[in-house]
Amino acid sequence: MNNLVNLKNETGSLEPRRQGHMGGGKLSSHHDWLKERMLGNGEPTLDELCVEFAERGVTVHRSSIGRLLHRLGLSHKKKPDGQ
């Protein structure tokens, strides 16, 4: 009951608060850079991209980069050497 009173006092309404994460993630401001990087020279690995993000001051796991690439439609399998 106290939560409802606090909600009414803070917002002036009893509408429920928004649930879940409020932001777009720490990589959202790097989408354009990542697109340019992937479409430029070479095919960087996820580990190479992790190092490049670290140089830009962003600590990120390779799986997060992989998911972002997939969402941006840029994921692909590297071809083995010699093919």
Image (cartoon, rainbow, N blue to C red):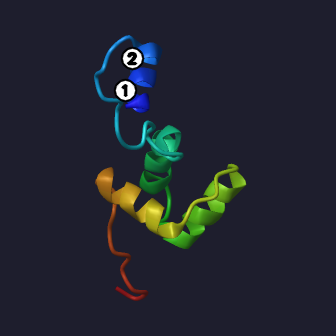
Q: Report helix, strand or loop for mark 2.
A: helix
The structure residue drawn at horizontal position 32% and vertical position 68%, both measured from the top left corner, is: 76
Question: Is 57 on the left-hand or right-hand side of 48?
Answer: right
Residue sticking out furthest to the top:
12
In the image shown, does 12 or 63 lie closer to the viewer?
12
In the image shown, does 35 or 83 lie closer to the viewer?
35
Measuring from the top left, give residue 27's x and y in whole percent. Answer: 51, 47
Q: Report helix, strand or loop for mark 1.
A: helix
In the image shown, does 33 or 30 lie closer to the viewer?
30
The structure residue drawn at horizontal position 54% and vertical position 66%, both measured from the top left corner, is: 61
Mark 1 = which residue? 4
Residue type at mark 1 is Leu
In the image shown, does 5 or 12 lie closer to the viewer?
5
Measuring from the top left, give residue 37's x and y in whole percent. Answer: 50, 52
Q: Quadrant of residue 15?
A: top left
* Residue 8, numbered label: 2
The structure residue drawn at horizontal position 37% and vertical position 26%, both measured from the top left corner, is: 4
How many C-alpha atoms fall within 10 Å of the one at disc 2: few (<14), some, or many (≥20)?
Answer: few
**Quick check: marks 1 and 2 in contact, CB under 8 Å?**
yes
Residue sticking out furthest to the bottom:
82
Q: Is residue 77 above or below residue 37?
A: below
Question: Is 60 on the left-hand or right-hand side of 13?
Answer: right
Measuring from the top left, give residue 12's x and y in whole percent. Answer: 38, 11
Question: Is 58 on the left-hand or right-hand side of 45?
Answer: right
Measuring from the top left, give residue 1's x and y in whole percent. Answer: 37, 31
* Residue 23, numbered label: none
